[in-house]
Amino acid sequence: MLLRMRDIEIDTSDRTAIMGILNVSDDSPIAFSRVDKERAVERALDLIQEGADIIDVGAHSTATGARDISHEEEGERVSLVIRSLAARGIATSVDTWTHSVAQQAAESGVHLINDVTGGQDSAMRQVSTVHGIPACLMHMRGAPKHHRSVNQQYENIQQEVMLFLSKARDTFVNETGQECWLDPGFGFAKSPEDNLKLLEGITELSSLNQPILISASRKGFLSELMDQGDRQDTEGLLSASLAFNAIAVQNGANIIRVHDVAATRAMLAIVDKARLRN
């Protein structure tokens, strides 16, 4: 599958693309991924050297209890980094659910909008329309930082996610004329068992014929699956992330969003070869 993002194309027909996480926030729960804006470009270049294809720049954490920052501060943090990386020809995405921040990122040259709210805001879709930028649309009940407070009981989680993303895709593509990626939203208002069902359902999600992005790196549900409780400082989270992502790739994922790029690239060197033999 060919990923088209403004002036950049990435061919995933024989390999899985890696999206490296660049947190320019000061309270991301994964401490080592946080970087101040003065060192952000250097860190991004390190991630590219390690094997990242895309740098996902975010400044506002979606974690429960994360502090609120103004749209102006968020926009300034991400746009400075994106502008510098885009000038170097590096593919970037902006991790935001705020249309004014997406607008600043678009003006700075961002290649993809990574929208955890699934493109439900018409103003966010307008940014894609005006600037010709694709988006990644994620399934989530509730709102960022508040997804734990909503009903997490599903009659059929695979069916709900499939229907939500299918409708989101149709609305986005028809309104903007741009391509979109799909993200099932691992860890957002979903139990550990729900996440396992969604992992199995990636194959079915592939029938929507859109690139599928998986974002499960070092999330608390992996710790729960290891019987260690919902934590993001559990020993072994890297190994759990690699295992989960390996299965996701085998099931049809095209892009995986991760904190640990070098380890992920090594894993994919094996998994992609094995997958292509089948």
Image (cartoon, grey):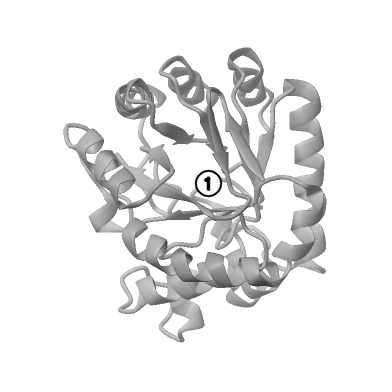
- Which quadrant of the rendered structure holds the C terminus? bottom right
Q: Residue 235 appears at what percent x and percent y?
A: 30, 79
- In this rendering, the answer to whether 152 lies above or below 129 is below
Splitting the image into 4 quarters, where does residue 85 fall?
top left
Residue 218 spot, x, y in % from top left: 40, 65
Q: Report the side of 70 relative to 227 (left or right).
A: left
In this view, the residue in front, 221 or 83, is 83
Secondary element at tag 1: loop
Residue that appears at 44% across and 62% down: 217
Residue 161 seen anywhere in this rendered image of the structure: no
Badge 1 density bin: few <14, some 14–19, many ≥20, Cα 10 Å: some
Residue found at x 24% / y 37%? 40
Amino acid type, mark 1: Pro
Relative side of 123 to 101, left or right: right
Q: In the rendered image, which residue does mark 1 sit on? A: 144
Q: Position of residue 84 (x, y in %)?
A: 30, 23
- Residue 93 screen position, x and y as percent: 47, 35
- Residue depicted at x 28% and y 47%: 49
Which quarter of the picture shows residue 46? Answer: top left
Residue 247: quadrant of the picture: bottom right
